Amino acid sequence: MSVTAKELAKKLGISATAVSMALNNKPGVSTETRTKIINAAEKYGYDFTRIKHDPNRSGSIYIILYKTNNAILSYTPIFDELYDGVKSEFQKEHFTIKMVRFYEKIDILEECFSDLRISNCKGILLMGTEIRQDACQQFLSLGYPMVLLDTYFDSLDCTSVLINNSQGAYIATNHLISGTQSQPGYLQSSYSIPNFLERQEGFFKAIKENGMSPSRSIIHKLSPSIEAAMADMLEIIDRNDSLAKCYFADNDIIAIGAMKALMLRGYRIPDDISIIGFDNISESRIIEPSLTTMDVPRLYIGKTAAKLLIEQIDSKVVHTSKVEISSRLVKRFSSLNL
């Protein structure tokens, strides 16, 4: 004879409400408690056919764009492509989508949580490019199915979908070395995020594997906007600081700003200095010369994140994962191509 939800609650010493929420895949209980309840239900023969599933998917998916600084996520086309991928998958499943833009310097996190608690939220897709670990943990503690997009924390039990930044930077750096037969410099963002730290790892891995000393790589710290990066690079050039024959940049925005400064001071690209960026933003195609860069399949990343969140919503037992999406080299005219 199968066990009832009330009997299961008594066996586990957990409230009947918590058992009901876990069995019906509703928020309000931690992932650990939910897993414990589901495992016990299977062990004691709970009849899962009692649970009714709504084919019309009533409820909302909250897409939360978390910002700590205007420096990185101010370039909205990158997020727009991710959103298009996310939206296409959720619409197939008839979920309502709600967008929330949270700016850490202005908004209050508890107010955001209060809105989620009183809403018919079915899951959270958290755009965490800039988010800190402690803030991410607070979102996880709400108990909703959640996928973290564009970053990852080793100590958090959370499904994450992100770019394989190290791999992309490694490929870009190897391409520079092959084309120029010289040690690349690094155009590094003055504002650091996990993505850039991973790209730095890939850059130095390629340097070492090519028999070069990381300490000999010229590094310039530039602000992460085209205008500010251009101004920073002009200052570097006008100080007569040493310049490399080629550079890998943390992103296309920094690369484009540096290119503008170099060309303004008479340097020819790529004949004098080669540059590779990262992200393949639209401006990289129209600048002259066009920018060699690492293409990020943002639409696919968005679709992947949405599918994983839907899987969490539908699953009795949630298994978290880390999914890294590879980028590919797009050869244009800012680098010496083989």
Image (spheres, rainbow, N blue to C red):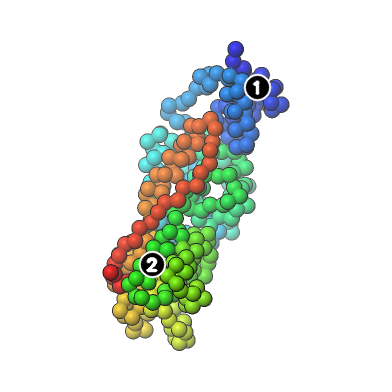
Residue 173 in percent (x, y) is at: 40, 68
Q: Is residue 205 or residue 157 the one in the foreground?
A: 205
Q: Residue at x 35, y 78 (%)?
A: 273
Q: Is residue 308 or residue 336 the one in the foreground?
A: 336
Find numbered disc 1 in the image and state the secondary structure of the residue it sits on: helix
Residue 218 in percent (x, y) is at: 47, 77
Quarter of the image for residue 292 reads bottom left
The mark found on residue 174 in the picture is 2
Crowd tier of the residue under label 1, counting other residues whose Cα lies within 10 Å: few below 14, some 14–19, many 20 or above:
many
Find numbered disc 2 in the image and state the secondary structure of the residue it sits on: helix
Q: Is residue 260 left or right of residue 159?
A: left
Crowd tier of the residue under label 2, counting other residues whose Cα lies within 10 Å: few below 14, some 14–19, many 20 or above:
many
Q: Is residue 186 left or right of residue 176?
A: right
- The residue labelled by disc 1 is 8
Quarter of the image for residue 106 reads bottom right
Q: Nearer the viewer, mark 1 or mark 2?
A: 2
Q: Is residue 303 left or right of residue 332?
A: right
Relative to 254, residue 96 above or below: above
Residue 212 in percent (x, y) is at: 46, 74
Q: Is residue 85 or residue 62 the one in the foreground?
A: 85
> Is the Cβ of the residue at disc 1 closer than 8 Å to that at disc 2?
no
Residue 284 in percent (x, y) is at: 33, 65
The residue under label 2 is which amino acid type?
Asn
Q: CA distance from mark 1 to mark 2?
A: 58 Å
Residue lying farthest to the front in this orientation: 211
Relative to 70, residue 301 above or below: above
Relative to 111, residue 56 above or below: above
Q: Is residue 118 or residue 264 the one in the foreground?
A: 264
Q: Residue at x 46, y 37 (%)?
A: 310
Q: Residue at x 51, y 44 (%)?
A: 321
The residue under label 1 is which amino acid type?
Leu
